[in-house]
Image (cartoon, helix red, strand yellow):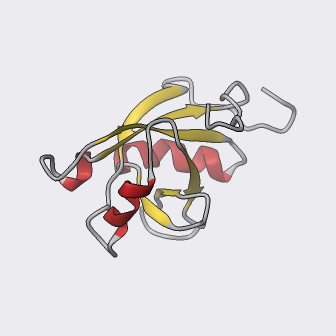
Amino acid sequence: MTPGSPSFPDDRPRCFRATVHGLAFADRERHLSQMGRGDHLMLIPDPPGGEDPGVWLHLATGEPVGHLPPEIATWLWPWLVRGGTAVARVSALHGSEVPTWRRLVVKVDCGDDAPARGPTGD
């Protein structure tokens, strides 16, 4: 942990996979065709002050794709807002054969030892 970094919750995983919710709204599902396995997505926490704040995933262009499940946002959001850092990469993509909330799966790495984004998305 670098100086000034917030303490990571002891009882939470620093690396995990999660489904991305909210693809069915605002035509966000269209972004799936632009993604490939290993692509990086930005993790953006909602601003403070909202009821039930979430953690959103955005393309490099800034377009929102969806959000992490609320049960993850309840502990990840406060850590991110306090200055924590995390990297999200596309782990799996599925088509219309599965419900929209299961079509995009990401791998999230939290903290100073999260892998840096390489020039090829590695």
Q: Residue at x 25, y 51 (%)?
A: 101
Q: Quadrant of residue 106?
A: top left
Q: Quadrant of the C terminus?
A: top right
Residue 21 location, quadrant:
bottom left
Single out the residue that lies furthest toward the bottom. Answer: 26
Quadrant where the N terminus is found in the figure:
top right
Residue at 25% x, 44% y is 94
Total numbered circles:
0
How far across and down, in percent of the image, does residue 62 sit?
59, 66
Residue at 65% x, 53% y: name it: 81
Which is more toward the observer, 88 or 76?
A: 88
Residue 68 on image: x %, y %: 41, 49
Is residue 20 toward the left or the right of residue 39 in the image?
left
Residue located at (54% from left, 41% from top): 88
Which residue appears farthest toward the left when viewing the image?
97
Taking depth in this image into account, of 100 and 18 the one nearest to the observer is 100
Residue 31: quarter of image: bottom left
Task: Determine whether 4 is above or below 25 in the image.
Answer: above
Residue 4 appears left or right of 110: right
Q: Is residue 23 left or right of residue 89?
A: left
Q: Position of residue 116 (x, y in %)?
A: 71, 33
Whether residue 56 is situated above or below residue 113 in the rendered picture: below
Q: Position of residue 28 (x, y in %)?
A: 36, 67
